[in-house]
Image (cartoon, rainbow, N blue to C red):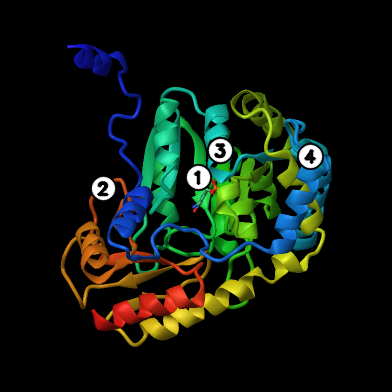
Amino acid sequence: MTINMQSNLLNSKLPSTAVSIFSQMSALAQQHHAINLSQGFPNYPADPALIDLVEHYMRAGANQYSPTAGVPALLEVLSKKIQRLYDLQVDAKNEITITAGGTQAIFTIIAATIRPADEVIIFEPAYDCYSPTVELFEGKVIPVRLQGPDFKIDWEEVRAKVSSRTRLIIVNNPNNPSTKILDREQLEQLEELVRGTSIMILSDEVYEHLTFDGKKHLSVLEFPVLRERSFVVASFGKLLHTTGWKLGYVVAPTALSTEFRKIHQFNVFSANTPMQLAIADYLKEEEHYLQLPMFFQKKRDFLVAGLNETRFKVLPSEGTYFLLIDYSQVSRLSEIDFARQLTSECGLATIPVSAFYSTTLNQHLLRLCFAKDEQTLSAAIQILQKV
Ligand code: PMP
C-alpha cells in the first residue's frame, strides 16, 4: 500500500528514458569480465605533471569557490588557445564560462534557450543527452536522420524541417558516433540556413582536438553568422584524458553568455577550483593539445590494422576517439542483440549505433572506442579476429 502510494507520487518528466546504453554496456562488460571498448573513456593514466599541479593547488589552499564564470587565469589561457587555433578574438571575461563538464554545459544551454513547444533540430545519430534535455524543458525534438556509411546531410531536408518555432539547431562536430567532420561547405550551408532568423546553434565541439589525417577542425566561431548565435561546448575530459574530472567550458557571445551564467549560477554556481588552476598552468604549454591528433591517430591506426584481418568492415574514422565497424558479413542480428552477444559470448563490449537514433534502425554498425592502451586494443583485435 505504502509502496503504491509512493510510486504514484512522482509523475515522471522523462517516462521513456531508461539507464543509458553506455552504463548498460559497461555493466554487462563487468558482469562478463569483457574488454570494454563501449563507453568513451581512456583506460590509461592522465599526465602525472597535471596531477601534481592539482595536488599543488589543493595543498596551497585553493579549495574554495571560484567565480561563477571560472578562474580568470584559465579563462585567459582558453582565450589564447582559441586565438592560436582559430585566429579569433574571444573575450575571456565575458564570453567563456567554465562548467562541470560538457554535459552540464549542454543542459544549461538548453535550459537557457528552450520554452514549451519550441522546436530543436537534432541530427541523428545523436549523443544521448540532447533529446531528453529538450523534452525536460518541454521543447519538441525535430530529428534529421543521417545514415551510414557516409552520414551525409541533405540540407534541403533540413531546410524543410525549419519552422517559425525552430529555436535551436544542435550540431556535433566532430561527431560521436559517426566520426564525421563538418567541412567548410557544410558549415556555410548551416550559416545560410540560419541567416536572418532567430535560430540559435548549440555546437558540441568536445572532440575539436581529435581530427585525423591532417584534417583541421573548423569551429562555428569562424563563421560570422554562426558566431553571433552559437554556444560552443568543450570538454576537458577529452582534452586531458580525464573524463572523471567533469570539467568543460562554453564559448558564446556576451549576451548569450550572460543568460547562460544566470542559470549556471543556480545549478552549479562554480566549477572545481584547484583543477581549474592546474589546467590553466598545464595548457600554457601548447604541445599538451597540439600533439593530441597524432596521439589518437596512432591508436586508431593500430586498431584499424588489426581489424583489417577480421570479417568486420571498418568505416573510416575522421575524428573523435571512436570508429565504426560493419558486422553484416558476420551476423544479421539487431545491433543491440549482436552487441550483447559479443559481450557475453566473446568478451568484448561495444555500443550499438542504433542507440543514437530515436527510431528503430539496423545498419549492422557497432561503435568502438580506441582511447585505450595497446594491450587492451590488442586483446580486442584478437577477439574480433576469431569471430
Ligand atoms: N558531447 C559528446 C558528443 C560526447 O561524446 C560527450 C562525452 N562522451 C559529451 C558531450 C560530454 O562531455 P563531458 O564528459 O565533459 O560531460
Question: Answer yes or no: do the residues labelled 1 and 3 have beta carbons within 8 Å?
Answer: no
Residue named by callout 1: 170
Instruction: Report the residue at 70% width, 56% height from top.
Output: 51
Q: Earlier in the sequence, mark 1 or mark 3?
A: 3
Cα distance between the residues tagged 1 and 3? 15 Å
Residue that label 2 marks: 359
Q: CA distance from mark 1 to mark 2?
A: 18 Å
- SS type, badge 2: loop
Instruction: Tell me whether circle 4 and circle 1 mark residues in contact (CB < 8 Å).
Output: no
Mark 1 belongs to which amino acid? Answer: Ile
Percent of width and height locating residue 128: 41, 46
User: Is the residue at mark 3 in contact range of ligand 1, meaning its CB lies under 8 Å from it?
Assistant: yes
Q: Residue at x 62, y 71 (%)?
A: 293
Under tag 4, what secondary structure? loop
Q: Are marks 4 and 2 in contact (CB under 8 Å)?
A: no
Q: CA distance from mark 4 to mark 1?
A: 28 Å
Q: Which residue is nearer to you in this view: 180 or 92? A: 92
Looking at numbered disc 3 in the image, what kind of residue is underneath it? Gln
Which numbered tag is attached to residue 71?
4
| Mark-to-mark CA distance, 4 and 2 | 42 Å
- Residue matched to label 3: 104
Counting residues from the start of the chain, the first of labels 1 and 2 encountered is 1
Q: Label 3, label 2: how many angstroms apart (C-alpha)?
A: 26 Å
Say few, some or many: other residues with alpha carbon within 10 Å of mark 4 (under 14 / 14 to 19 / 20 or more): many
